[in-house]
Image (tube, coloured by chain):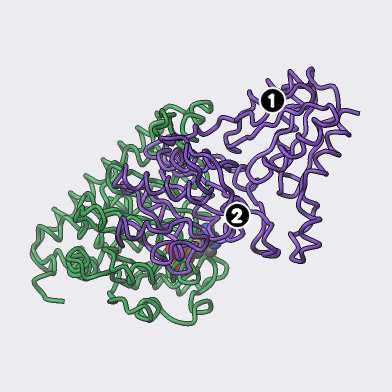
Amino acid sequence: MGSTDAPSTTYQLLDLYRAMRRVRETEERLAALFADGEIPGFIHLAIGQEAVSVGIAAALDEHDTLASNHRGHGHAIAKGLDLDRFFLELFGRRDGHCRGRGGSMHVADLSMGMLGANGIVGAGLPIAVGSALAHKLRGTGHIAAVFFGDGALGEGVVHESFNLAQLWKLPVLFVCENNGWSEFTETARLIATDPQRMAAAYQMRTCKVDGNDVVAVAAAARTEVAQVRAGEGPCLIECQTKRVRGHFEGDPQKYRDAGDIAVAAHDDPLLRCEAQLIAVGTAQRTIDEIKTETKIRVDAAVANARAGAQPAPLDAFADVYSPEREPVS
Amino acid sequence: MTEVRFGGAINRALSDALTADSRVILLGEDVAQPGGPFGVTRGLFDKFGPERVRDTPISEAALAGVAVGAALTGLRPIIEIMFMDFVTLIMDALVNQAAKVRFMFGGQTSVPMMVRMPHGGGINAGPQHSQCLEAWLAHVPGLKVVCPATVADAYGLTRAAVVDDDPVIVIEHKALYAAKGELPDPPTATPIGRARIAREGRDVTVVSYGGMVPVALAAAADLARAGVESEVIDLLSLQPWDEASVLASVAKTHRLIICHEAVEAFGVGAEVAARVADAGFDELDGPIVRVGAPFMPPPFAKALEDWYRPDAAKIVAAVKKAIS
Ligand SMILES: Cc1ncc(C[n+]2csc(CCOP(=O)(O)OP(=O)(O)O)c2C)c(N)n1
Ligand SMILES: [Mg+2]
């Protein structure tokens, strides 16, 4: 990776920091709202993994498509989804992205190329491959990206997707967010190989980055996205990261050493980015302002969501199928 | 009117769909250069080229997921699953993705994909290549399921499925592929969700679909010789199904038989029977009788398979039971 690819200017670094702060603030707020019983269901937080979603999304264009997974809040927000509608959706309100029918695991905004979070492990990969096929056949110039965890490597459809993408030289970026855990089990106890070797078995280009260093992730993403966009075929980026919270909120993590959690929390990508900012001469005041701005923005989104209208059950029938059209001959 | 085979009618429909809309692509195992395991896609690769007509690896699960992703990104994919038995491998993409996307994303988008798959026995293909699993799919909100019985509807439902904005599964009875029939000139789309009266009659309504329609018509001919006039309804669509047409027929005949090759238990017939027993209760003069395969996997041996698959004699017996 050439150093010219690194987002070296203070301005770019501040953008990355601001985006990570937005994800973090959102998820910390979700944790509190969930604990208070204001948000129902399952929520899986990616606290400590923000550098992955933000670093990758920084290399994508607005109309590049993105498939995500169950731990997808960061992916959606980094892709640029509106925070008000995001919170409305997590609160199960009528005006959420999905009219309150999807919730945390299904946030989607097709107008932003966001093809949805996904409650089925591994399911996003073939969707991204199909999206990439459409980009290629339609000549859109866009690419498809997909985030998935290390646990997803056990799914057959992941292998099938690697093979298809490489066979057809499709413009798809596979991003393996390797946090070492598959729910309540260390992935090392479940998978006989590693993401790079697995993709390489299908002759795919791969690289591995420190997924807690947003500069490294953004640089790798920029290089690889350029190649994918140029028609060089798919690529897998393995981002080594750490899961700070439980698998889902409310998970007591009895299966995990306290030390492992502490190590994860200590390697905070936001603190690392702050140190990088200070090193290039950014004033602490600037960082603090970003924190304050972000908090105010999230406060507003939460207040808006709290006040949001409830969805009407009968309205849901309207979208089981598309509106009827006249058949053509 | 032109006489063509059932498989040929589907081929023409696919060709016309690929011609009509450049967003349509066709993917499946052996569908391109080899022309399809049953020859249904013959010639399409030569006509439309390798970008739009693609042979895929033996990766059904990914193939169906690819169709979802392509449909979400502006294409209208058609995929072929070689035998309906392999639908087990694509259930996630169909049930958890394709069927739910529109609903789960709040109506933001549709998933205009079509899946073709042959079902049914008659070629001694055994327990893993002969099943009729349509009830599984008809049970899923968000999917549409159709099953043509005639050459005209093989063409017509295929065209309708491709232009439909939702995921449509077109189930083709493999024993029908070689059957000949009349294709109107020009051929037309068959609306999804409407049944067809295949034979009019006043004494009993026989609801059927796909490969069982000709069998039901043969039974009706037998019964007519005994003075019983059957009204044979070809459902064409299983999800949504044309409840109004069935109820109208029952209002005339007051007796109902439902026959399909799928196992009788928990099948399409159970749903039709339950709805008519509810909405049409006042019209019924006798028990609703179902004819389906016995509750076992489809067996291989000719003697076993012939016994297993419902035939005209079984339908005649069911009608006699219903009117006795
Ligand atoms: C097909 C499927 N199997 C199992 C689950 C339950 N499940 C949800 S997340 C998860 C672990 C996934 O691990 P990984 O892909 O590494 O993602 P992470 O949670 O670490 O972000 C499991 C087993 C599921 N949602 N889907
Ligand atoms: Mg993991």
Is A293 or A170 nearer to us in this picture?
A: A170
How many numbered markers are drawn?
2
- x and y percent of residue B222 in the render? 80, 36
Q: Is residue B244 visible?
A: yes
Q: Residue at x 40, y 46 (%)?
A: A107
Q: To which residue does mark 2 refer?
A: B174
Q: Which chain is green?
A: A
As drawn, is A282 to the left or to the right of A137? left
Q: Residue at x 41, y 70 (%)?
A: A179
Q: Which chain is purple?
A: B
Which quadrant, please, contains the C terminus of chain B?
top right
Q: Residue at x 41, y 33 (%)?
A: A306
| Numbered disc 1: secondary structure | loop
* Chain at numbered mark 1: B
Kind of residue indicated by mark 2: Lys
- x and y percent of residue B93 in the render? 49, 54
- x and y percent of residue B203 in the render? 79, 23
* Chain at numbered mark 2: B
- x and y percent of residue B4 in the render? 50, 46
Kind of residue indicated by mark 1: Glu
Question: Are the residues under marks 2 and 1 on the same chain?
Answer: yes
Of labels 2 and 1, earlier in sequence is 2
Q: To which residue does mark 1 refer?
A: B200
Crowd around label 1: few <14 · some 14–19 · many ≥20 (10 Å):
some
